[in-house]
Amino acid sequence: MNQPLRYLSTRGVAPELDFGEALVTGLATDGGLYCPESVPAMPQLPPLDAPYHEVAYSVTKPFVEGVIDDGEYRAMTEDAYRSFRHVDVAPVMSLGGNTYMADLSKGPTLAFKDFALQLVGRLLDHELEKHDRRVTVIGATSGDTGSAAIEALANRNRVDVVILHPEGRVSEVQRRQMTTVVAPNIRNVAVDGTFDDCQDLVKAAFADADLRAKFNLAAVNSINWGRVMAQIVYYVTAWRAVAPDGGPVSFSVPTGNFGNILSAWYAKRMGVPISKLIVASNRNDVLTRFFETGRLTAETVVPSLSPSMDIQVSSNFERLLWEASNRDGESVAALLAEFRAEGDVEVPESWVDAIRSEFAASRLSDEGTLAEIRRVHDELGLIVDPHTAVGIHGARKYASLEAEIPMVVMGTADPAKFGDAVESAIGLRPELPSFLSELFARQEVYGRSLADLESIVGFLDDVSRS
Ligand SMILES: *Cc1c(COP(=O)(O)O)cnc(C)c1O
């Protein structure tokens, strides 16, 4: 068997870990994120008509090899995608011309987060069982991670869960998908603050060594390497769907925390011939401004019609900065400390150039988002959610520059998850799939908290069996 791949922290101080340890640890003890020491070349892929889970197994196996038994891993990948409501799991459809959409909304909570969390939940249980351990997962959500994590982790034996969401800033369907799942190992907390406040509370909990040890804190936020890994797969299947001869492809990805599009970057490193990666932002456009100015400048988060992208600190961008710096953890740590302290930092020119050579960026206002939903509906008879609409706009901005290269938009959610926005765009309310028709009748259970670590600790105390 090959030596297991090692995982390194982007801040260069925390110990190197193997896949299982990095999965369970989440955030590194130096505040950094774990990344693979080397990116494996694309393994031999199964035939084009193979089921999604077989591609998932082949593409991700090199990342877990030597830690998880091959047969057990194959069974986990097969099980993870069973609950998806489409035979292709991530079906690809035409949006006209050379533009396509990979529909990532067919999982149990109707957003792309299910792809990673369904697998990560199983991986986590497997690792904890193996080492006879328990963890308490603490997570911040802008809406979709929370429901996907709860769906994947409810009633699991070795995991307790506290999920923080910004009160009043997630859609009603998103909130209900979280708060109507009643399980002894789940606590939902509505925090008086923004998503970034929620994410800061999670980071503060992790930064407190006593808390971390007392509750065996773990993270399944998109900083968890397991999630980035699982998402690589649908970039491979989408590429093979639109370029079966192996030709180049571009992707436009509705972006918030930079987790989804980072997986595309890893797919490229593994060998998918990706031409452009388009970072499509809503009005909370810290990344788009970075591409324009070479600076990271935090502004206040403004609620938008695409709440899962209402973020001004895109955590996963740190992984790209680390690679762009030639893995200079010390400089990455210094840069991010300055950003945190000043709210503004100039990124070294060589890093900016490296990033600009592979990515482009777009932004779309709420009015533009409504217009895009309307246009897609008028021209294609297709109803898309506001996040996907932001991605389609990004694709249109760049598709004509390389018209011969297929452009794939990642369709990140089902429009029924964001019914209000869709209704105000086209006057029609998309229906929830029938398996969720009970959602509005169910009792909601959740706590409330100020954006204050001490009261979050109360929720940890209440649920944790660690
Ligand atoms: C999470 C989410 C995004 C943003 O993805 P990141 O990985 O955070 O960049 C976009 N659209 C939807 C529907 C989401 O749930």
Image (tube, helix red, strand yellow):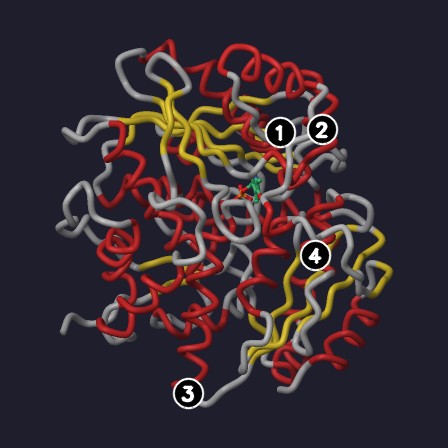
- Which comes sooner in the sequence, label 4 or label 1? 4
Q: Check disc 3 and give the amino acid type.
A: His
Residue toward you, 434 or 223: 434
Where disc 2 sits, the SS reads: helix
Label 2 sits on residue? 421
**Position of 426 relative to 465 (above/below):** above
Instruction: Kindly indicate whether the residue at mark 1 contacts the one at mark 3 (C-beta within 8 angstroms).
Output: no
Q: Position of residue 32 (x, y in %)?
A: 51, 60
Q: Which residue is mark 3?
A: 131
Closer to the chain start, of discs 3 and 2, is 3
Where is residue 92, by image quadrant? top left
* Label 1: which secondary element: helix
For marks 1 and 2, the one nearer the N-term is: 1
Label at residue 386: 1
> Answer yes or no: do the residues labelled 1 and 2 have beta carbons within 8 Å?
yes
What's the residue type where badge 2 is placed? Ala
Label 2 Cα neighbours within 10 Å, binned few <14 / some 14-19 / many ≥20: many
User: With 356 as the anchor, is 70 left or right in this view?
Assistant: left
Q: Earlier in the sequence, mark 2 or mark 4?
A: 4
Residue at (72%, 34%) from the top-left corner? Answer: 299
